[in-house]
Image: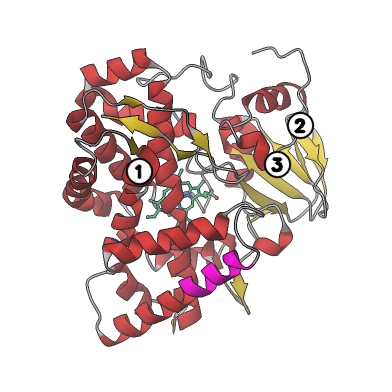
Amino acid sequence: MATTSVPSIDLLSAASFRGGHPEAQYAWLREHDPVHWHDEPGGRGFWAVTRYEDVRAVGRDAATFSSEPTIMIPDGDGLEVGDHKMMLTMDPPRHGAYRRTIVSSFIPRAARAMRPRIEAIAGEIVQGVVGRETFDLVEDVAGLMPSYVIADMLGIPRPDGVALYELTETIHAAPGSVPPDAAAEAVRAMFEYASGVWADKCAHPGPDLATTLVQAEVDGAPLDEIDFELFFLLLVDAGGDTTRNLVAGGMDALFDDPDELARLRADVDGLLPTAVEELLRWVSPVVYMRRTATRPTELGGRAIAAGDKVVMYYGAANRDPAHFAEADRLDLGRAPNDHVAFGGGGPHFCLGAHIARVEIEALLRELLDRLPGVHRAGPTEWLASSFISGPAHLPARG
Ligand code: HEM
C-alpha cells in the first residue's frame, strides 16, 4: 500500500495503540524506514523493525540478537532476583536447559490430550453468558479461559488462576493507571502465592506442571524456590492476556467484517483452523519483543552497533504486503499463513502456541454454536499499552 502523508511516529506512547495497532505508522515505516531509529525518553533509543523478513531474521538469530538483559524496551524491566531470571530473558544454551524442563507439557501431543478438558471449559464459560442481556466478551468470556487452563495445568484451584491473572493485569498496567506501588505489590503477592505452591507441591507432589518444576533439574542441579517462582510468574503471565486478547480481538475483527463472520458460521468445522491463524495474524496480541545486538551487524541496510536495542514489531510484520497477499484483508481461509504472532521462530518461539490454538478454537466454536446471533453491543475499548494489544472491554449481546 503506498502511503503519501508522513504520520508522526511514536511507538512508545500507549495512546498510539488506543484503537489497536497503529497501522498507519507501521505502513509508513515498512515502506520508507523499515529499520527505524526511535528515540526513547530516558533511554538510549532503539531500532524499530517492521518488515516481515527483518523480524524473522532477528527472531531466528539469537547469537547476534540476545534476549538479555530483557525483552522489554526499558532496561530496568527484566524481572530478575540475584542471578536468577526468567527463561524468556535468557540466551542459549542456558535458555534451552530451562525450557527442556517443561517442554513435554506443551508439545502437540500434550495439547491434543488437553483438548476435551479445554472444550468442556469453553462450554461452561459461554453457557455462563447465554441468556444475559449484555456481557463483556473480555472479562466474562475470553479472560476466563487462559486463567482456568493454566490453573488446571499447574494444579491450583481455578479461582486462584483468575486472581493471579488479575495480578498480572496490575503488573502490566500503564504507569498512571494504577496507584504508584500497585505493580510492585502485585509482584510481591504473586511470589508469595508461588512460594505457597512450592511448599505444597514439595510436600504433596501431583500430576501437574508445578510438581514437574519442583522436581526439575538443570545441568544436574535441582531448581530452587526462586527459579520456581520466576517460572510460575512467566507461565501465569505469558498465556493470560495474550490468549484473552486474541479471542476478544478476534471477535472484534469479526463484528467489523460481517461477511467473514457469515463465512465462518457457514462452515465452522472446515474454516476454523485457518480462521484461528488468520485472527492471530490480524490481532497480533504481543506488540513487540526486544533483542540486544551482541556484535556490530547490518539489518535492512542499517548499521547496528553492539549493544543497540532492536525491537521486532510483530503486528507490523504480520501486515507486510511484501509477504502477505492482500495483507490488509481479513481472509479466514488464508493458507499458507506463516504469521509471526507467536514470535519470529527462534529459540523463544511461544511455548504455549499449541495449547493457545486449542483454547482459541474451542472458545470461538462455543461462541458461534451457543450464541448464533452474537453481535457488538457497544464500541470496543482498547488496552492502554504499547506492549500488549487487544480490547480491554468489548460489550456484546447474544
Ligand atoms: C494467542 C496467544 C499467545 C500469543 C500471541 C503468544 C505469543 C508469544 C510470543 C510472541 C512469545 C515470544 C516469542 C519470541 O520471543 O520469539 C511467547 C513466548 C512464550 N509463551 Fe506465548 N503466546 C500465547 C499464548 C501462550 C500460552 C497459552 C502459554 C502457556 C500456557 C504461553 C507461554 C509462553 C512461554 C512460556 C513463552 C516463553 C518461551 C521461551 O522463552 O522459551 N503463551 N509467546
- Residue 325 image position (x, y, % from top left): 51, 16
- Residue 164 image position (x, y, % from top left): 41, 64
Q: Which residues are magenta?
A: 181-190
Residue drawn at point x = 69 percent, y = 27 percent:
25
Residue drawn at point x = 54 percent, y = 42 percent:
383
Q: Is residue 206 visible?
A: yes
Give the residue pinned by disc 1: 142
Q: Earlier in the sequence, mark 3 or mark 1?
A: 3
- Residue 23 image position (x, y, % from top left): 62, 26
Mark 2: few, some, or many residues within 10 Å (few <14, many ≥20)? some
Q: Report the mark closest to the observer, 2 or 1.
A: 1
Residue drawn at point x = 35 percent, y = 43 percent:
142
Considering the numbered disc 2 on the image, is that residue within a helix, a strand or a loop? loop
Tell me the number on the disc at residue 9.
Answer: 2
Tell me the number on the disc at residue 13.
Answer: 3
Considering the numbered disc 1 on the image, is that residue within a helix, a strand or a loop? helix
Considering the numbered disc 3 on the image, is that residue within a helix, a strand or a loop? loop
Q: Is residue 335 visible?
A: no
